[in-house]
Amino acid sequence: MNAEETMIKIVNVTKAFGSFTAIDRVSLDIPRGGFTTLLGPSGCGKTTLLRLIAGFYQPDSGDIFIDGVRVNGVPAFRRNTPLVFQDYALFPHMTVFENVAYGLKLRKVPKAEMAERVRQTLGMFGLEGLEKRYPKQLSGGQQQRVAFARALVTGQNVLLMDEPLSNLDAKMRVEVRNELKELQRRSGITAVFVTHDQDEALSLSDRVAVFNKGKILQVGTPWEIYFKPQSRFVADFVGVANFLDGEVEGVEAGDLVVHCHGHRIRVDKSDYSVQKGDKVTLVIRPECISISFGAEDAAGENAWTGVIRRSIFLGRMIRYWVDAGPMEWTVDDPSPIRHHASGESVRISLDKAKIHVLPAER
Amino acid sequence: MLAEIKKLRNEPVLALLVAAVLAIMALFVIWPVLKVVSFPQPADFARLFTFPRWYQAALNSLFMTVISTLTCTFVAFVFAYSITRLDIPLKGLFRFITLLPIVSPPFIVALSYILLFGRQGIISKHLLGITLDIYGWQGLWLVQTITFFPYAYVVIHGVLLSISPNLEYAAYNLGASRWQVFRHVFFPLCRPGVAGGALIAAMNVLADFGNPIVIGGNFTVLPTEAYMQMTGWFDLPSAAMLSTCLLVPALTLFVINRKWVGQRSYVTVTGKETSLNIFPVPAWIKWGLFSFCLFVTIVVLLVYGVLIYGAFTKTWGYDWSFTLNNLNYVFEKGREITNSIQYALLSALGASVLSVIVAYIVERKRTGVNRLLDLLAILPGAVPGVFLSLGFAMAFNEKPLVLTGTSLIMILALMFWNLPTCYSSNLAGLQQIGPSLEEASINLGAGNFRTFRNILLPLLRAPFFSALAVAFLRSVTCLSVVIFIYSASTSVGTISILALVQNGLWGSAAAFTVVLVSIAFAVLGVANLLVRNQGKWQQR
């Protein structure tokens, strides 16, 4: 994988439908051979961008380049950007074989070669023996694999996917996720994946672009998106976070000291260039907070005692809402011994290296 | 809208297609209507009120429409309710009964009615030995009810089917009584369907020509009166005036149906369909409704039975012995039957092809004139057959396009009369096909035309062919649309049957009808066999 090379380049693209601006001056480089996810809530413009790449829409302004060629005005059927649809869009009047062969037929691939390539692709997806079935006669999972086979059989090196996993049940979704990642890695295809599911985005992608209201808020690796969000929206949309507003008091021994609602919180300064007097928002993930029960320990630096307000059992962990120090915290206990009741006393403490600092918005 | 029209410059093929469709529609839909409407002078319209006979015909038309609509809707609702909501036997037979009148010539019920209750009627004279005067509004009312309740049934049945029984269960669950559930939940949900069904029935009764001409007697209505003026007196201004007066209420009903009922249909189909049983109904209601349906069914069966009996009876009313002589006459009139089948096939094909193109443009393309195209395609549905016939006769009797007496005018008139039927079917079919299928095809490298041919057309098979079949049957059995435009060489079966009925030759009329309908179904059966084995994917 050559991460330096751009396969799809979006330059300052705007697309409006009537008075609604779906995509607002968006620029994005999609690297060759990478797995890029467009993530955002519904109506944020991520699907519109995918359809602009596929050529179903033409941009109002801005340019789209695929493999170095400007494709503005190139009709969708000449773009060679196979797309896996959310509802699969399998042709109900064609068999599995005919569905997968359709793209090859349009390219006038000779019959024998066509049969061989379809056979290979179906084999790759474990669909042997289903050639003569109609889509109606397949399970949801099989239909989905036919949709992938149909998109990949023509051998293009781009694959667009519009929430292709959203119609699968939860367990299946995780399985297919792993297969999909493996398939993309092996084939070296440039994948563009649209989803509103943050777990999918984080687990599949090399790069994630987070959308909101027609704009890209942040592009980065899943790690960056999760632990170093550049805005409150990204921090809130991806995962769960505690937000604490405060003001920088100064720097002590390489740590930032932030004053929040009468409490002093120390933050590892290394990554941040903020100055005394700056208004900031601290972002702390629930799993980055230590929680201990019994609360004999007194409060200390970055630590408070408090009480459990409520909690939910999530199987792999217990999530508590704890009233302590400056606010009510969301705290995860990842290795619970027992489920503590509301009203019990607890002590929570923050690791100064696991606190993320954002400039305050507003 | 203007912006969309300008954008068409980028798609010259589509722009040409839209222009061609608009031109065709203007010529064959708008032009004939304008011809008729603009022909009478204001003085001619004044005569509607000064000439008692016409004034009476107008009142009669309204009166007949109102009472027949009430009974049609009632019968249709009982049938629809019983078939969708009751656990009763003979449902298959009841469904069949609601189909029969739709595929029969328009005056078949009237003809049977004469055979049953007329002066020589098998029930009136033979069984009871009495003489009834059956010509008049009471007879017509009964005949119109039997003829047109199936049209209302189709609409009401569709709406009742879409009402999930879950909603009734939810109401029962909240503590509603049976009557409260019916009044507060079930009936409000049916109301759009009932109103829609009533309007369809009303439009048909209002425009009907066949039954009133056969059985109305001195009870004249606007379509028959217009016909008398044309054929009896060659009084074109009066015929045009009377037809125009018919058009006004017909258009009103049509607009109400589109605007009011169209917007009030609650679609209750959700993704989560359960197979909950229908909530049981008390036995007396159930068997009461069943008896009602059975009674109507027997009447309808009697209507068709007596027709077949009549076809093979020597002299109706005097000599009941079996004969094949009536068929001789039918074979003498071979050309009329050939014409019927030929015109029906060509017009149905024409309407189907044109309607698929229009439906595709309206549903899938933004041309800026979508609403206009949609309106033009359904407009002939609002125009009474007699009016359309007169319109074609007047519009194409002069330059630039003289078609009088040709087969082409017959085919064109029937084709545009059937356009709304085919269009609605194809449009609904297209709406069922998710746009992502076309996008998937385009995404894989197929252009617009290939996508239309490879994806849309095969998926549209079912609505396309069912509309084609209906259009074909309607054309074979159509009388009103051809009444002013046929010539000696282009006459069709229904015209001959009307002549036979008017001359009191019941046996020959019955035989002719039986043969015509049989041939129509045979053609349909063959066509069905030809296309069936290609639609495998739908059957599983």
Image: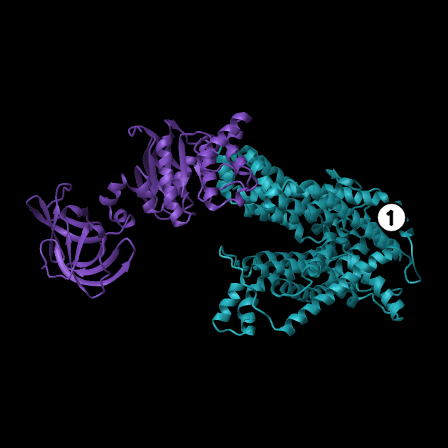
Chain colours: A purple, B cyan
- Does residue B440 lie above or below B192 as drawn? above
- Residue A287 in the image: state x and y as whole percent: 22, 51
SS assignment at label 1 = helix
Res B314 visible: yes
- In the image shown, does A32 or A118 lie closer to the viewer? A118
Q: How many marks?
A: 1
Residue drawn at x 85%, y 58% is B309
Which of the image's four quarters has the N terminus of chain A?
top left
| B310 on left or right of B343 | right
- In the image shown, does A268 or A177 lie closer to the viewer? A177
- Does residue A304 lie above or below A251 as drawn? below
Residue drawn at x 66%, y 60% is B152
Res A56 visible: no
Residue drawn at x 70%, y 51% is B37
- Disc 1 residue type (three-letter): Val
- Does residue A141 lie above or below B76 as drawn? above
- Residue A249 in the image: state x and y as whole percent: 9, 50
Identify the residue under disc 1: B330
| A155 on left or right of B214 | left
- Residue A187 in the image: state x and y as whole percent: 38, 31
Label 1 neighbourhood size at 10 Å, few (<14), some (14-19), many (20+)?
A: many
| B159 on left or right of A87 | right
Chain to which mark 1 belongs: B
Would you identify the image quadrant in which residue B190 lies? bottom right
- In the image shown, does A323 or A14 lie closer to the viewer? A323
Would you identify the image quadrant in which residue B69 lies? bottom right
| A138 on left or right of A265 | right
- Residue B436 in the image: state x and y as whole percent: 49, 42
Farthest residue to the left: give it.
Answer: A253
